[in-house]
Image (cartoon, rainbow, N blue to C red):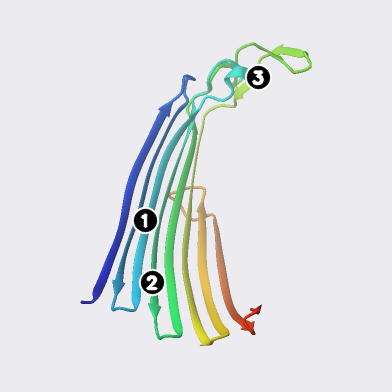
Amino acid sequence: GLVGRVDYFSEFARFETDNDQPNNAYRIKTYAGRFGAAVAQNTYLSATIRWLDKFYASPNGMSLFGTPDDAWQTGRMSSVGLSGQTQLSDRWIASGRLGLSVQRARFVNPTTSGTVFSGVGFGDVRTITGANGYSATGRGVLDWGPYDSRSRGVRQGVYAQTTYQAGRHLSISGGGNYEREKAYTDPDGDPTTTRDNGTIWVEGRGSVLDRVSLTAG
């Protein structure tokens, strides 16, 4: 038939913990999958999927401030890749890939923690002693007030490569790739930064008397 073999892998994992420190919970969920098929005896197609979702609460340095901050952050990443490789002849092989990845991040400080003075949150009175025995007593600035920062990044790319075995001692490869990156300070708005990356390359590899390898590109 058209499809000679099918390969697959799929896994989901979740890890969660909460330390004795207040506001110090951590959670991560991940998924990874790969699915492939051998087609028409000389072509292999595959797709990969990767997804990650994490949450991290940050109380700040309890030994320095004595009271926890209520800040937390989240991060999410997803990527999809499609690839194909075909044996055009006994000497000629070609491959190509498409990829898309999206990352989102959020940093939140819901309230001004600690003892609030002029809009700034201070920790408890603490005495810190250094290794040389010197000590200092006072209140440290725990945070500067509420904030909610969000961002998003997107990368899209295409890559192609081909290799021809010109003889026993010589092979020639060539390829190129193009990638577009977009960054968003407002995840729901227009991109604030964009960048295009491109590469074209050619490379020859050979050997002399089966003892010396030569590469030029």
The answer to whether residue 38 is seen in the rendering is: yes
Disc 3 secondary structure class = loop
Q: Which mark is on residue 140?
A: 3
Give the image location of residue 4, x and y in percent: 25, 72
Query: Could you say where residue 159 lies in the image, as x and y percent from the top left?
Result: 48, 71
Give whichever of discs 1 and 2 has the lower sequence position. 1
**Foreground tag (1 vs 3):** 1
Q: Position of residue 21 (x, y in %)?
A: 49, 20
| Among the two numbered marks 3 and 2 on one chain, the one whose residue lies closer to the N terminus | 2
Q: Which residue is mark 2?
A: 84
Q: How many marks?
A: 3
Front in this rendered view, residue 191 or 26: 26
Query: Which residue type carries mark 3?
Result: Gly
- Relative placement, left or right, of 96 versus 134 is left
Q: CA distance from mark 1 to mark 3?
A: 45 Å
Residue 117 seen from this side? no
Residue under the point 50% across and 80% down: 163
Task: Specify which label sits upstream in the sequence, 1 or 3.
Answer: 1
Q: Which mark is residue 184?
A: none
Tell me how far mark 3 sits from mark 2, CA to CA: 57 Å
Which residue does the numbered mark 1 point to in the structure image? 49
Q: Secondary structure at mark 2?
A: strand
Q: Residues within 10 Å of mark 1 (few under 14, many from 20)?
A: some
Label 1 secondary element: strand
Quadrant housing the C terminus: bottom right
Task: Using the image as rendered, state which of residue 18 and residue 36 is in the foreground.
Answer: 36
Q: Amino acid at mark 2?
A: Gly
